[in-house]
Image (tube, grey):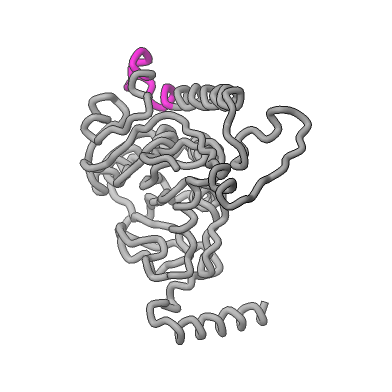
Amino acid sequence: MKKAALLVSVLAAALAACSPQIRLDLLGEDRLQEVVLLPSAAREKVLMIDIDGTISSALETGFLAREKSVVARVFERLERAAADPLVKAIILRLDTPGGEVTASDIVYHEVLRFKERTGRPVVGLMMSVAASGGYYIASACDTIVAHPSSLTGSIGVISIFPSLESLMSKVGVKVNVIKSGPSKDSGSPFREMTEEDRKLFQVIIDEYYEGFLEVVARGRKGKVPAADLRTIADGRIYTAPQALKLGLIDAIGYFDDAFGKAKDLASLKSARLVSYTYFPKSKSNIYAGRLGDFSPLDAKVLESMLAVLKAGFYYLWLPQTP
């Protein structure tokens, strides 16, 4: 442990010497820490958890990263909150176009599990975008507040299968595939998708879509008429006023409104707003970034961009498919 700590110190010093933009106080701690964002004389707390970027179970691999995947990050915070009796409510702040089907479903499940075992309310607060998988997760919240300029909706599923066959033929590269059955390489980027492939994947898409509809129907029961759900859930995005009219959200407002709603649901007159982070000096207020924009070595942004190019199934708002 001492050797590892020494190595980190040496590397940190070297990085600082090479680039003045990299701040040593943002390298992060080895343990998750509680940071008070809004102080109060009350002992009770409302915890804010951020879900931002592409929802994925992929590990964040930036050199300075102390965090895990989005899924692990949310799970870790929910577990700590459940163990703290002073955390009376959670604000789930969403700024995401969605992401992987499985990752979105896991986060949704963990939010429901937290509510079931603690009986504590969860308020969803939509920022710029809370679409597709972001809306899927919001459906687990007791109430949803969206900023006036939020975009949400995009209820549906998309599959992404890049094709490299034309490019490879231009450069004279060919891939030979030996398979046990005609569908064994379905979705391969090395050949064009057949009609049979499309039918096979459409069945999967339709199944995931039905699951998405069930989640929304449960979360918005009595707020979105069942007869209207399929019409609403055609993949389009909605502005906050449109979403409110359709029953997809409960209110339009700002952070103060979500904070007030969390306190009301928890029957609190006053509460401290807290956050959990490995980067306490970067969390100076409710709008401070998780890591800041300082690190050219952090692969988070690149990871989010490249994620949409990976073959797979997504609850994702993707305006321009590859």
Residue displayed at 37% across by 32% down:
154
Provide residue 320's location: percent of width, then percent of height.
38, 41
Q: Which residues are magenta?
A: 216-229
Quadrant in the rendering for residue 135:
top left
Can residue 35 be seen here? Answer: yes
259 with respect to 279 (left or right): left
Image x and y of residue 21, in percent:
38, 78
Looking at the rendered image, the quarter that the N terminus falls into is bottom right
Q: Relative to residue 272, is residue 253 drawn left or right?
A: left
Reply above or below: 305 against 291. above
Q: Residue at x 43, y 72 (%)?
A: 26
Q: Residue at x 23, y 37 (%)?
A: 252
Across and down, in percent, residue 94 comes to 37, 45
In the displayed image of the protein, which residue is found farthest to the top? 227
**184 relative to 267 in the view: left or right:** right
Residue 86 in the image, given as x and y percentages of width and height: 44, 51
Q: Nearer the viewer, residue 109 or 198?
A: 198
User: Is the C terminus in the top left, top right, bottom left or bottom right quadrant?
Assistant: top left
Q: Where on the picture, by quarter, is residue 203?
A: top right
114 part of magenta stretch: no
Residue positioned 24% across, 35% down in the render: 240
Work out whether 71 lies above or below 246: below
